[in-house]
Image: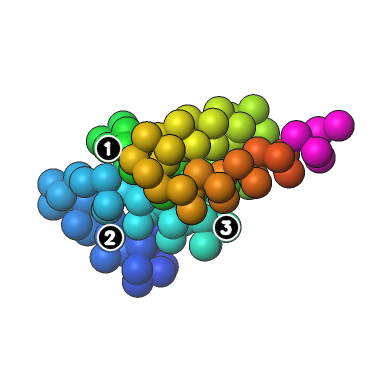
Amino acid sequence: MNTDKPAIRNLEALLANGRDTALLRFSLGSEYLKQGDPAQATVHLQRAVALDPRYSAAWKLLGKARLDAGDRSAARDAWQQGVTVAEARGDQQAAREMTVFLRRLQKNAG
């Protein structure tokens, strides 16, 4: 646990007290990503989408965390799933953003 950052420390304390929710995991993932720890961010973001598979923002951030961790294939998978989820929910902005990320990933691969 990274306890040198107050936001992470506070969120980890909530988790330790049994408050395991998709929003809490998303918040932890976001904070770990901001601190440059994509591996730890991925752990929390994967849990967020497991708790709420329809959480399009979590899919989007999970793709970023995976990409930052150097796993382009897993990033692509997350964003593809995220686009499906976002479109099903009518979250067109998130779907467009993840589609752009997928195009960039494809472009940079070739």
Q: Which residue is mark 3?
A: 36
Identify the main secondary structure in magenta. Answer: helix
Disc nearer the start of the sequence (1/2):
2
Residue at x-position 31% and y-position 64%: 9
The residue at the point 25 percent across, 36 percent down is: 51
**From the viewer's perspective, is residue 55 above or below residue 31?**
above
Q: Secondary structure at mark 2?
A: helix
Query: Helix, strand or loop at disc 1?
Result: loop
The residue under label 1 is 52
- Asked whether 109 falls inside the magenta stretch, the response is yes
Which dot marks residue 16?
none
Identify the secondary structure beneath mark 3. loop
Q: Earlier in the sequence, mark 2 or mark 3?
A: 2
Amino acid type, callout 2: Leu
Circle 3 crowding by C-alpha within 10 Å: few under 14, some 14–19, many from 20: few
Of 81 and 13, nearer the camera is: 81
The residue located at (22%, 51%) in the rendering is: 15
Between the residue at mark 1 and the residue at mark 2, the CA separation in whole angstroms equals 18 Å
Q: Which residues make up the magenta segment?
A: 106-110
Tag nearer the camera, 1 or 3: 1
Q: Residue shown at 34%/40% (left/top)? A: 89
Query: Is residue 16 a member of the stretch shown in magenta?
Result: no
Looking at the rendered structure, the kind of residue marked 1 is Asp
